[in-house]
Image (cartoon, rainbow, N blue to C red):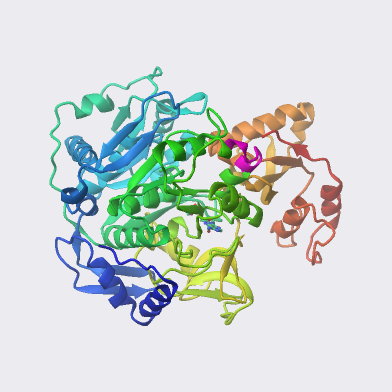
Amino acid sequence: MIPKINTLSGYLYEYQKSVTNPEAFWENIAQSFYWRKKWDKVLEWDFVNLDVKWFVNGKLNITENIFEKNLFIFGDKPAIVWEPNNPSEPGVTLTYRQLYEKVCQFANVLVQNGVKKGDRVCIYMPMVPEAAVAMLACARIGAVHSVVFAGFSANSLADRINDAEVRVVLTSDGNFRGPKSIPVKAVVDEALESCPLVDRVIVLKRTSMAVTMKPGRDVWWHDAVRGVPADNKATEMDAEDNLFVLYTSGSTGKPKGVVHTTGGYMVYTAYTFANVFQYDSDDVYFCTADVGWVTGHSYIVYGPLLNGATVVMFEGVPNYPGVDRFWDIIEKHKVTHFYTAPTALRSLMGYGTEPIERHDLRSLKVLGSVGEPINEEAWQWYYTHVGKGNCPIVDTWWQTETGGIMVSPIAGVTPTKPAYATLPLPGVQLMIVDNEGNELKGNNVEGNLCIKFPWPGMLRTTYGDHQRCINTYFATYKGLYFTGDGVKRDADGYYRILGRVDDVINVSGHRLGTAEVENAINSHPLVLESAVVGFPHDVKGQGIYAYVVLDAASKTHDPEKIKDSLLAAVTKVIGPIAKPDKIQVVSGLPKTRSGKIMRRILRKIAEGDATSLGDTSTLLDPGVVQEIIGGALVRVKA
Ligand code: 7RM
């Protein structure tokens, strides 16, 4: 069993142990797992060249730790309780044994299709149990999954497939999302026109919408599994063999493939799940994330299943068929642990408490928040109306790169404070630095959040480009992992995450690089250049504000049509999540003499705070700023 903290003094004691002797601390946690061969050494590390190895020479398979290790105890326990988009459609419950059989069978299918240990497999699927089966089947045979959120465009999908040199793609015909059916296979087909390496696509039938199947390349999932045996001996993996790659946006244009390895990620996600949520064996855990994001990887699939948890997996959206859908699911499945994003709470707050009061939520014990800072108002609403004042909220701060939760209350153990992620978990050594990299010691300080010591769940590299990983995360402050987030440590030593300090924006909990959105806008033939910044948005947390300079040829076009086609360009290049909320056409962008766009000024204007622009003495043409402040803003309908 994974050691669980259950008192505040226990937390302080474990934390102290984890800092005094991290190797001994993590070695003890790692003992709770099934290793084919134990490690020779717990940790080797170097944060300058980024070379981190946990459980050196340990051998294991993560799926053996989900299944074989536990089947005897909870083989008949529900592992995945699947709730379809449409509540009148029957759901599916898979016990651990049934899930195991599906995983083994699909692992065999992958092998039959030529997938070998180390090969990358792209998963572009809706929120159906087969998405989890696909991930675990990859892990079973040592293939590296690259899950791409099914809301990304063909362009984005193709970029990710090519970057990871994927040969096999797993997908579905379509996707039910609220009242809509969304084509999925058609997007894959479009993407694959520029992915010469892909020679096999396995297609799950979900919506039964019409699709084209390319002979020799495309096969139906149900045909592929027919008659395939449901037993498979897991492939032995080194602790440091890659488990998956997951693309995430940064401050440069191209998303990076964050690489996670097997042993450390297993230990970290399982330990953090058990402790942060204080999951007990009869609990029912519901996380509303999509498996296309890291939260889905670590806290729908790996963390919970490694703990033998019952996980509710939801295909749909919070407002279909009604705005009480989450509360309906909680009541129906007697959910004890509910984990969602502040943006969802803020949008549901708009409907008042009546939709909640229609449901019996007495099963709830723990509430979680993830993805973006939770504002105090949303925190209070969550606490009072969803949790009825007796469920602790765990505000969990972490990142794709960290693999698992880093700063968070331990449910029922750490005293909470609205909008605070509170304290670091055991094994997490934070450091706050100023812009020059000097450590800000003591309490009541605010600065850049860094981590100074490795933790087992951390990223090991970015796929295909190790130097880029070093430059992005380990070069800003030498010897430290830089998170890109600003943080405050208050008088009690509690941490409050303030949001990104780099050119990354967080829109409805989705991470986007401003450069990525600019590139998409710039792909429009009438655009000369653009600058994108975030601005405070009541529901989304941050909205996207685009300043666009158009070609003279645009004069002959209808401005409304141009706006629509700009949005279409962004949807095509990235996906609908990246559509700007506001577009302002400007005649020029504020630049320094050396040609750098002064985003600081644009951010201020977007925030509606043009009175305090700060130092503008380096501006090449101050007239541009005056024009922008006085300029007309084109609002884009949501
Ligand atoms: C898990 C996830 C990471 C970025 C991160 C932060 C922001 C995430 C919180 C948060 C404040 C939180 N991974 N973030 N959780 N900010 N409080 N509890 O979201 O890679 O997609 O995003 O999200 O800015 O750097 S992610």
Residue 596 or residue 329, whichever sits in front: 329
In magenta, the rendered stretch is 347-355
The image quarter containing residue 561 is top right
Q: Work out whether residue 453 can be spotted.
A: yes
Q: Residue 17 at what x, y percent from top left?
A: 36, 79
Position above or below: 459 against 629? below
Q: Is residue 231 left or right of residue 269?
A: left
Answer whether residue 349 is magenta in the image.
yes
Residue at 66 percent across and 51 percent down: it is 534
Location of residue 7 with respect to 298 vertically, above or below: below
464 sits left or right of 478 in the view: left
Left or right of residue 538, residue 283 in this image: left
Q: Residue at x 57, y 77 (%)?
A: 437
Residue sticking out furthest to the top: 210
Q: How many marks?
A: 0
Quadrant in which residue 322 is drawn: top right
The percent coordinates of residue 88 (x first, y second) are: 43, 23
Q: Quadrant of the C terminus?
A: top right
Q: Nearer the viewer, residue 607 or 24?
A: 24
| Residue appearing at x 49%, y 53% in the figure | 368
Measured along the vertical axis of the image, is residue 525 above or below residue 519?
above
Q: Nearer the viewer, residue 605 or 191?
A: 605
